[in-house]
Image (tube, rainbow, N blue to C red):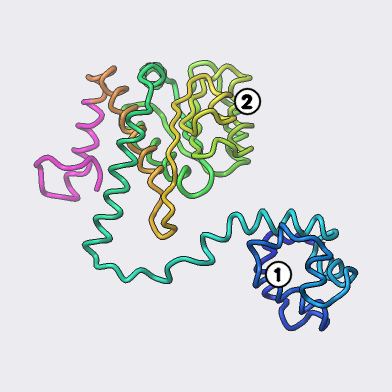
Amino acid sequence: MIKVIDLISHTRALEGTFPKREQLVADFVLANLEKISFLSQHEIADATGVSVATVNRFCTTIGCEGFRDFQIRLAQSVAVSLQYLGGPNGDQSESGQLVTQVFSTLVDTLTLARKQLDGQPIDHATDVLANARRIAFLGVGGGSANVAREGANRFFRLGIPSEAHADGYLQRMLSSTFTEGDVLVAISSSGQPAELLDSVAIAKQYGATTISLTKTGSDLANLTDISIQIDVPEDQDIYKPSASRLVFVAIVDVLAAGAARKRPERVKENLRRIRTSLLPLSKDSGPKPIGD
């Protein structure tokens, strides 16, 4: 049997299909999500007018091994879900207010991260990256994977073979081909993904240098040779985009700018070639971004 991950959605989906007495339990659970984890089987049975055995049958009906398993799994689901189950239903703020709110959050987050950054690991990482034989930027999920792609985009322009990958299997295989002189950069806001931890361990085994951009004190931070650590709280407004990803992009820009300054002549020639290659696509020969 497939293990149910989202008990709240699963219980909702089964509404109307439960036996009559189990439906009473389901209705009570959905109406009291925040306090179910603090109630005993007997208390739920008394509140719904059913037997303790009915409460236990309800738990097994929705895919749990029993009441204790149900209580633990529901508590975990509720802890994540409550911020999405209530709150505003579509803020009708004027666009000017939204611009102010989002930009203010980004500025505040960048300022907070700036105060946390330690110059020593940044200097060390910049030296290693500037002299790398090749670089792989690894991330999983949406935000970190996008930052990894931005890292590869920034560093190939410096004349260093650079790539980015978000697939866990490919990350492991790639890491096993790395050796001394190669650099693996693992990016994660939580510092917990098993794919990244495994890939870092594999690359280190074969002599590659590993760098992480991650949460302070995380497993990933502790595993890599060089760790750039920040602890940025996420905004409680669930509609706002995650500000931490822009902090990570800013740090990648710092590393790229620092590495470029350590190999100026080669970088200038690469940028000249890239800009020249794009000239036929745009007749504007004035200062422009390298790429659109």
- Number of numbered discs: 2
Q: In the picture shown, does residue 97 fall above or below 19?
A: above
10 Å crowding of disc 1: few (<14), some (14-19), many (20+): some
Q: Which residue: 70% across, 69% down?
A: 29
Q: Which residue: 81% across, 55% down?
A: 68
Q: In the picture shown, does residue 219 fall above or below 141?
A: above
Magenta range is: 268-292
Instruction: Name the residue carrying label 2.
Output: 201
Q: Amino acid at mark 2?
A: Ala
User: Is 74 contained in the magenta span?
Assistant: no
Instruction: Name the residue carrying label 1.
Output: 29
On the image, which quarter does residue 122 sit in? top left
Residue 284 pos. (x, y %): 10, 47
Q: Amino acid at mark 1?
A: Val
User: Is 285 contained in the magenta span?
Assistant: yes
Residue 257 pos. (x, y %): 28, 27
**Real-space Cα separation, disc 2 to disc 1, in angstroms:** 44 Å
- Which quarter shows the N terminus? bottom right
Horizontal relation, residue 18 to residue 289: left or right: right
- The one nearer the camera, 274 or 225, is 225
Q: In the picture shown, does residue 29 fall above or below 161?
A: below
Mark nearer the N terminus (2 vs 1)? 1
